[in-house]
Image (cartoon, grey):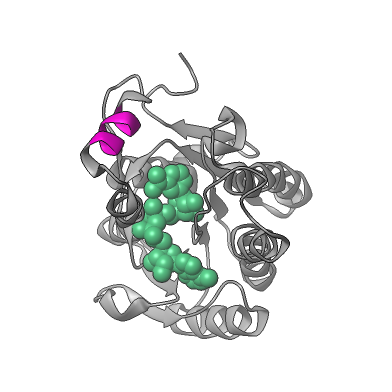
Amino acid sequence: MTDFAGLKALVTGGASGIGRATADLLAARGAQVAVLDLDPSTVEKPLLAFRADVGDDTSVREAVAAAVAELGGLDVVVNNAGIGAQGTVEDNDDAEWHRVLDVNVVGMVRVARAALPHLRESRHAAIVNTCSVAATAGLPQRALYSATKGAVYSLTLAMAADHIREGIRVNCVNPGTADTPWIGRLLDKAPDPAAERAALEARQPTGRLVSADEVAGAIAYLASPLSGATTGTSLAVDGGMQGL
Ligand code: NAD
């Protein structure tokens, strides 16, 4: 993979799971990386850490400005922070719908709005949004979460169209179930965590969960000059879940 030497990247939700694996991979490939997270306390050098809540516009604007000032510019945005929600449409009330849509969808819009003026100054500008198989797979018990990721998918296509003539590419990755602290928390709540894990593994034709590093690899590709002619696409990293 072409390395990221000289490139400056921002990763939201970069303190854990997919975001952390991505931040570490980009840094290992030579990027200067700033992590924005609700809790950046575990983020270590060479990563730069900024506390931010993507659910709050002021917080995002301040953190992006501080990160860009410290990085000295911005080339890559990995819009990855997100939260889960379980249940059918009967299980989540309006307040929960607004809360999860606000973080998962409007959060990405806030970060993009704050980042776009800086990306326009870059000669290699790329945004990668973390979407999900949930956007298109029709997963049971994930109505709200799936709706947020469907919106992220559409947002990716619309942003790609809006910004390609400014030299800014926008793509997304669609992970299947990935082995991150998020899934650990989900399994901890299950009546039989081992059986639940086996069911999640069986849902993917590879018979195993996707690793955070595998998703990070796909994000890095879409962020790198190797994908310089690619915009408005989604890259599945789902163990064959949607393709078979
Ligand atoms: P994770 O819980 O391990 O990490 C998420 C990170 O986002 C955490 O560090 C958390 O502090 C941060 N975060 C949450 N809310 C935030 C907010 N309001 N502002 C700033 N930071 C916030 O989760 P993960 O599994 O690595 O998931 C990362 C992304 O991948 C999410 O968008 C998720 O929807 C998506 N995804 C995950 C899976 C999976 O199976 N793990 C599958 C498909 C898509």
The answer to which image quadrant residue 221 occupies is top left
Q: Where is residue 156 drawn, in percent x and y?
A: 66, 46
Q: Depth check: give the residue in front, 130 or 138.
A: 138
**What residue is rendered at 40% in x and 40% in y?**
218
Q: Main secondary structure of the magenta part?
A: helix
Tell me if residue 130 comes above or below residue 67 in the rendering.
Answer: above
- Could you tell me which quadrant the N terminus lies in? top left
Q: Position of residue 239 (x, y in %)?
A: 36, 26
Region rendered in magenta: 195-201
Residue 151 is covered by the magenta coloring: no
Residue lying at 42% horizontally and 35% vertically, measured from the top left:
176
Vertical comparison of 66 with 165: above or below: below
Q: Give the percent coordinates (x, y) of residue 203.
A: 38, 25
Q: Taking the image as drawn, is residue 113 in sight?
A: yes
Q: Is residue 221 left or right of residue 121?
A: left
Q: Is residue 172 left or right of residue 31?
A: right
For the view shown, which residue lies furthest in the top direction? 244
- The answer to whether residue 9 is seen in the rendering is no
Q: At 34% from the left edge and 68% from the top edge, which residue is drawn? A: 15
Determine the quadrant in which ligand 1 lies. bottom left
Q: Which of the 4 image quarters holds residue 138?
A: top right
The structure residue drawn at horizontal position 25% and vertical position 58%, both measured from the top left corner, is 28
Question: Which quarter of the figure is the C terminus placed in?
Answer: top left
Residue farthest to the left, as pictured: 194
Expressed as whole percent of the image width and height from the top left, the position of residue 104 reads 59, 58
Residue 196 lies in magenta, yes or no?
yes
